[in-house]
Amino acid sequence: MVSEVHHVELIKGISEQMKPILSKSPQAIYIYLDDNHKVCNKRFAELLGYKSPKEWSEVEAPLADVVEEDQQGVIDAYMNASKRMVASSVEVRLKNIQTGTIVKTRMIVAPFGHAGHVFTVHFFDII
C-alpha cells in the first residue's frame, strides 16, 4: 500500500514537472513508471481512440495498443532506456481502439529521472 501511494505521488509529480511539454508538444507522448503508473498527453490518448488521458492511464496492459509483431521492439526500447539509460528510436504500429485503424509511428524512448526513480518518456510521430 505504501508503495502504491508513493508511485501515485511520483506520477503526479512528474506530470506536473512535464506539464509544459505534455500540453504544448505536437507529438503524442506518454511517461511510464510501470503498467499501473503512467500518464499521457491528450494527443496520445486521441491517437489511440481513448476519450481522455485518464482513460488510457487506467488500462493495465500498455502494449495492448501495439500491433503484436511490434511489441518486442517496444519492450527492447523500454529495457534500453530503463536499464541501460540509452535512448532508442523504433517504428511502431499502434491500433486505435475505436476504429481498429493501424497507425504507423516513429517512437523515441528516453530515460528520465524524477525523485530518484527512472521513468521512460515515449514520443510518437505519425509516419
Image (tube, rainbow, N blue to C red):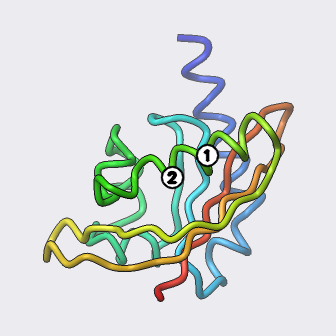
Closest to the observer, 1 or 70: 70
* Mark 1 touches mark 2? (CB < 8 Å): yes
Closest to the observer, 32 or 19: 32
Q: Which residue is drawn at 66% across and 55% down?
A: 15
Closest to the observer, 3 or 91: 91
Residue 52 has which mark? none
Residue 117 place in picture, x, y as percent: 78, 33
Q: What residue type is labelled 1?
A: Tyr
The answer to whether residue 65 is left or right of residue 24 is: left
> Mark 1 — residue?
78
Rendered position, 106 above or below 76: below
* Element on which disc 2 rests: helix
Q: What residue type is labelled 2?
A: Val
Residue 19 occupies quadrant: bottom right
> Mark 2 — residue?
74
Q: Which residue is drawn at 74% across and 57% down?
A: 110
